[in-house]
Amino acid sequence: MGISDIVDKLKNNALFKISLGSKELFHSNFIESILSIESPEWRNFSKIFLEFFLDCELEEPFFLDSSREKNHIDIQLDLYDNPEKLLRTQKFTIVIENKVKSLPDKDQLEEYYKSYKSTNKDNDKFILLSLIEPKDFKEKDVKPWIFKTYRDLSSSLLLALKKTENTLPNRNGKISFKDLVEEYIGFITALSDLGQLIDTKKEDSYDFFEGEVSGVNLRKLRIHDLALKLKFQQIKSLLKQELVPPKITGFRICGQLTKKIHPEPNAIYLNTDFTNSKALVDATVCLGRIMRNGNDINLYHCLSVQLQGDQLRYCSYLHNTVSEKKDKLSVQTIKEIHSKLIPGLRKEWFDNTVLKSQFLKIGLEAVRKGDGRREDRTQTEPPGYCKFDNEFYFRYDIIAKYDVKEGQKVPRRGCDQTTIVEILNYFIILMTYINNNKSSIIQTLTLVDSNYSYLKCE
């Protein structure tokens, strides 16, 4: 079965269409709702489903309380021996982290487990529910998390339905519980099939960033976000595999650089995101830290390489680590500091002609671009740059791709189609350049005034 066949199945599924408003919330809400109906018949369905899903036997008496987004947990199922709150004893809790639209992140799972509070934590079960299993880490790397896919969810629901279908009444007398769950099973089975077919290899062409995968326009079906998130997280995994000796040395590979993290020297932070209806992947290295009157203000200056759409971006990023509210710097402070740093980076970073690759466009469009659509730019800001807020400035090259003329793919302006491995190799070149030239880059920088100083990250 190909992607086009799966798309046809999804087009005809009512629950799929309902889910388009908020895909991840829809699934968590649906799963929680069918497990939380309070009646002996439905309680039996929930028990049998969980026994299949968790591959364990649940003892009677069995009573279940469920919740959504309690302490930032997607689904929490509390199992008890009595329905009365004053009389019951809790057996254990099932924590489900749902990742239907994205691949799980190892650091994120570890953070979820650390922040989870329970008096019975050793007996509780932690389930990662994902469309596809992660490739860059295993269950043993994130204990006690147990991996379950939407295929596991589908088969467990189907088995529970077969065991109980003759005892389940109609819900509200309008639609049978059996019909509702069967429609959902069909939906997530097709979704799981789609996830399994979305695979990214180094030798693949980089021609899917607009949402067309294997010749099927997934943007029309409004599931391009799901496909692109998976594709770019697979690119991130491939990049992580490439950032190893002898291709690159002296770096430790880390996950996302969140606001709570103090960037480490000689670390590369890898991240994926989805903004403006496009997926992205970036790699970030800390160049130095900004001091004010000799005091640490939790402000780090980083250089990033970012891939989004057909843009390869050379970025300057001011990272304000915020552990407590008092650590957050004002927008004006970050703006003043960054606007002064930017001009000095132009020669060594933004417009360094050494940083060029064959897969980037030739001809008139070989000039590195900036500005973009910046209606808020004033004369006091450095011209020639795109930016997000005041923390993130960048200039970019355009990546070569095919035009489609009369149904045929034609290389644009004489360029060959770019492959994933070309992009990965260029990331390595840029990371190596930053590492080897930190001192010379820092020498070009100008700070706001004498109250500020710049310390190399080392």
Image (cartoon, helix red, strand yellow):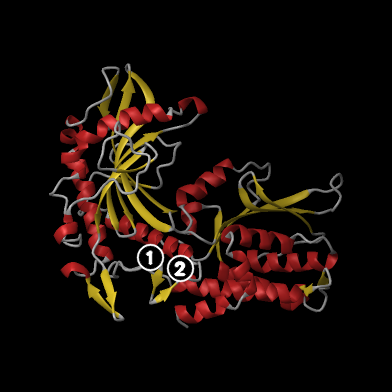
Q: What numbered label is drawn on residue 93?
A: none
**Vertical comparison of 352 with 159: above or below:** above
Q: Can the viewer see residue 458? A: no
> Which amino acid, by three-letter code, is at mark 2?
Arg
Q: Secondary structure at mark 2?
A: loop
| Along the viewing direction, whichever of 296 and 354 lies nearer the viewer | 354
Image quarter in which the C terminus is found = top left
**Residue 258 place in picture, x, y as percent:** 43, 41
Which residue is at 84% across, 46% downward? Answer: 85
Q: Which residue is mark 1?
A: 210
| Along the viewing direction, whichever of 293 and 64 lies nearer the viewer | 293
Residue 150: image quadrant is bottom right
Q: What numbered label is drawn on residue 219?
A: 2
Q: Can the viewer see residue 275? A: yes
**Residue 91 place in picture, x, y as percent:** 74, 52
Residue 451 horizontal side relative to residue 347, left or right: right
Which residue is at 60% across, 73% downward? Answer: 187
What is the spatial separation of the Cα atoms under label 1 and label 2, in whole angstroms? Answer: 8 Å
The answer to whether marks 1 and 2 mark residues whose Cβ atoms lie closer than 8 Å is yes
